[in-house]
Image: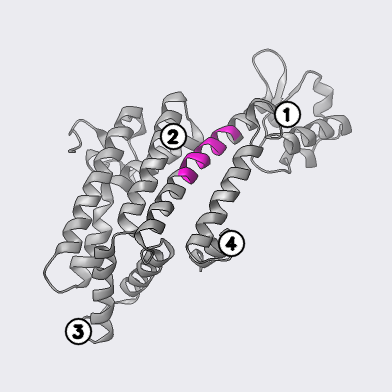
């Protein structure tokens, strides 16, 4: 798929520092760019893997980094909109994208030909046939580790199960994020008496003002709510704390089933990859 030239993501932004052109970006632009970007990256990586020339920094590592340019150019502004100014259409794109991107990632990191190409470069470096600077050496090592962490050495049946788990986790993750966000919004504490806000500055009070004459304290995505350290009214502090700790524990935004399903899928995936648990897998990837 070729991205239409009318799509603002078709080329690098001409704005200062290549900032995304949010004023002209529409939800359909992201969807088009994701589809085109994933197809383009896979095509480029297939060419990398099948290149008959000896592996070098340029035709392996630099080619690898160039392969995902369009996909990255689309994802970064999309993520900003998703977390700061989402709407139903953006949410729908994310829910559709997450399992597709998981499958896309598996198509890359379970590709033995790509892994062998990277291994060839590592072998040539060890033999002194090519020289890598510090950055290239780090990238090569990290890519090889990521392939191994992603299950490239698993047998076909285990790889198929891994692909299913990764897509399932992508679906569960987007569902949890949506429920968590909507539960946070629904859990906002409404204040009708200005006196309850004693301890806050006038500017902070004005920032909480709603159009109906009340004040609305939105929950942040942590258990501890920052305004609790300033509010003098014990009753309001209690309401704010309870709203924070009880979100996701019932009603329309209950996340308990999702959390259980995610934990079970993560545990199965970790065991499949040879790790004691999900934490061990995450800890290794962060090293």
Label 1, on which residue? 202
Above or below: residue 54 compared with residue 161 = below
Q: Nearer the viewer, mark 1 or mark 2?
A: 2
Q: Earlier in the sequence, mark 1 or mark 2?
A: 2
Q: Earlier in the sequence, mark 1 or mark 4?
A: 1
Q: Nearer the viewer, mark 1 or mark 4?
A: 4
Can the viewer see residue 12? Answer: no
The magenta region covers: 168-179
Residue 129 numbered tag: 3
Label 4, on which residue? 277
Q: Position of residue 155 (x, y in %)?
A: 37, 63
Q: Earlier in the sequence, mark 2 or mark 4?
A: 2
Residue depicted at 69% across the width and 28% down the height? 187
Residue depicted at 48% across the width and 30% down the height? 85
Q: Most extreme residue toward the front, as rendered? A: 157
Residue 95 numbered tag: 2
């Amino acid at each position: 798929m070729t991205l239409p030239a009318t799509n603002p993501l078709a080329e690098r932004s001409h704005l200062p520092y290549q900032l995304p052109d949010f004023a002209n970006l529409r939800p359909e632009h992201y969807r088009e760019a994701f589809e085109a970007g994933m197809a383009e990256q896979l095509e480029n990586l297939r060419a990398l893997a099948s290149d008959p020339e000896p592996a070098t920094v340029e035709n392996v590592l630099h080619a690898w980094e160039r392969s995902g340019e369009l996909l990255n150019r689309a994802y970064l502004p999309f993520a900003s909109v998703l977390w700061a100014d989402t709407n139903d259409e953006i949410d729908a794109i994310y829910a559709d994208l997450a399992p597709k991107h998981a499958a896309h990632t598996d198509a890359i990191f379970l590709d033995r030909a790509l892994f062998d190409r990277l291994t060839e470069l590592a072998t040539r470096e060890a033999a002194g046939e090519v020289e890598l600077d510090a950055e290239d050496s780090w990238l090569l090592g990290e890519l090889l580790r990521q392939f191994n962490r992603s299950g490239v050495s698993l047998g076909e049946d285990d790889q198929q199960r891994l692909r299913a788990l990764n897509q399932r986790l992508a679906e569960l993750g987007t569902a949890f994020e949506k429920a968590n966000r909507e539960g946070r919004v629904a859990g906002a504490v409404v204040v009708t008496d200005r006196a309850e806000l004693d301890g806050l500055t006038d500017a902070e009070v004005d920032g909480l003002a709603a159009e109906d004459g009340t004040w609305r304290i939105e929950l942040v995505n942590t258990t501890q709510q920052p305004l609790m350290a300033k509010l003098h009214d014990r009753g309001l502090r209690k309401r704010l704390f309870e709203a924070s700790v009880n979100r996701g524990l019932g009603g329309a935004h209950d996340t308990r089933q999702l959390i259980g399903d995610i934990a079970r899928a993560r545990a199965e995936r970790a065991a499949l990859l040879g790790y004691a648990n999900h934490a061990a897998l995450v800890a290794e990837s962060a090293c």
